[in-house]
Image: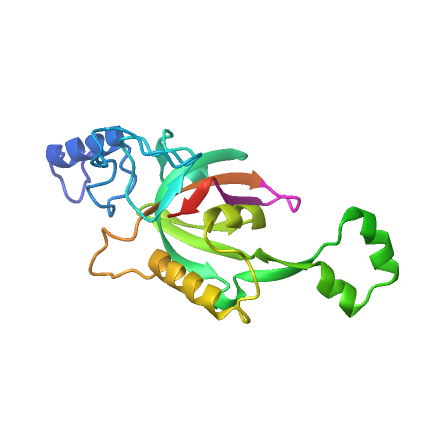
């Protein structure tokens, strides 16, 4: 229906292009046209264990365990009821904490048999003995339909960064350099090349104990 202020005929070319994008599940007007293109292997998949790549996959620095699932936009994820699971094609525009040194955090968790004893006789030495490092970060992602924060749980972080072991990044310079390079590749984008920097990821939505809706990464890894 035309506006009363600016009467005009419907733009058939625009409507046709929009319908074709819906049919192709092209979820972002910014994404490169290679999304969904053949991977150059005559449609054959390349075995990567659980992260199997079928003939048609979105390009990018990540792979998911659910390549056969359709792509969803961030708007679709936010509008879908929780709990739910989705696969999306997005750009990572920011990570939190912002300092890469702080993307791993300490956790003190002695084995169950030792917990009571440690609780009674807690000491700095005991803390150090049972201290381990886990991933501690959130990702701010975007596509043409919106932005969303995705939490990365410790176990999902180990899956997301399969080649990097969580540790004290202030103490392990070589690991820090490797992680910083990875995060820079994932997040630093050139505004003059908006078709680049897209990654695919799987996101689950759920309602937490606080009664609020949250979103969490799963089944995704960096190549």
Q: How is the image coloured?
A: rainbow
Q: Image height check: is 169 above or below 47?
A: below
Q: Is residue 25 magenta?
A: no
Stretch of the chain drawn in magenta: 207-218
Q: Which quadrant is the N terminus positioned in?
A: top left
| Residue at position x 59%, y 45% in the image | 212
Whole-percent x and y of residue 150? 48, 49
Q: Is residue 80 visible?
A: no
Q: Image height check: is 33 above or below 115?
A: above
Q: Nearest the camera: 165 or 148?
A: 165
Q: Is residue 208 magenta?
A: yes
Whole-percent x and y of residue 132? 65, 58
Q: Is residue 16 left or right of residue 50?
A: left
Whole-percent x and y of residue 82? 53, 35
Q: Nearest the camera: 196 or 65?
A: 65
Q: Image height check: is 84 above or below 222?
A: above
| Residue at position x 74%, y 64% in the image | 127
| Residue at position x 48%, y 34% in the image | 85
Count of numbered marks = 0
Q: Is residue 152 left or right of residue 178?
A: right
Whole-percent x and y of residue 204? 50, 39
Q: Nearest the camera: 170 or 150?
A: 170
Q: Image height check: is 35 above or below 161?
A: above
Q: Is residue 130 visible?
A: yes
């Amino acid at each position: 229906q035309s506006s009363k202020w600016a009467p005009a005929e419907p733009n058939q070319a625009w409507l046709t292009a929009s319908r074709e994008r819906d049919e192709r599940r092209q979820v972002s007007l910014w994404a490169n046209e290679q999304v969904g293109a053949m991977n150059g292997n005559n449609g054959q998949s390349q075995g990567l264990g659980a992260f199997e790549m079928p003939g048609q996959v979105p390009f990018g620095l990540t792979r998911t365990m659910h390549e056969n699932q359709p792509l969803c936009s961030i708007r679709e994820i936010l509008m879908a009821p929780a709990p739910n699971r989705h696969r999306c094609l997005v750009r990572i525009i920011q990570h939190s904490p912002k300092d890469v040194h702080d993307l791993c955090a300490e956790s003190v968790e002695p084995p169950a048999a030792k917990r009571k004893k440690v609780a009674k006789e807690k000491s700095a030495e005991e803390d150090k003995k049972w201290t381990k490092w886990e991933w501690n970060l959130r990702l701010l992602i975007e596509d043409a339909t919106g932005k969303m924060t995705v939490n990365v749980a410790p176990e999902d972080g180990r899956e997301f960064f399969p080649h990097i072991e969580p540790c004290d990044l202030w103490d392990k310079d070589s690991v820090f350099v490797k992680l910083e390079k990875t995060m820079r590749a994932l997040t630093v984008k050139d505004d003059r090349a908006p078709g680049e920097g897209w990654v695919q990821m799987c996101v689950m939505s759920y309602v937490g104990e606080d009664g609020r809706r949250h979103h969490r990464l799963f089944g995704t890894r960096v190549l």
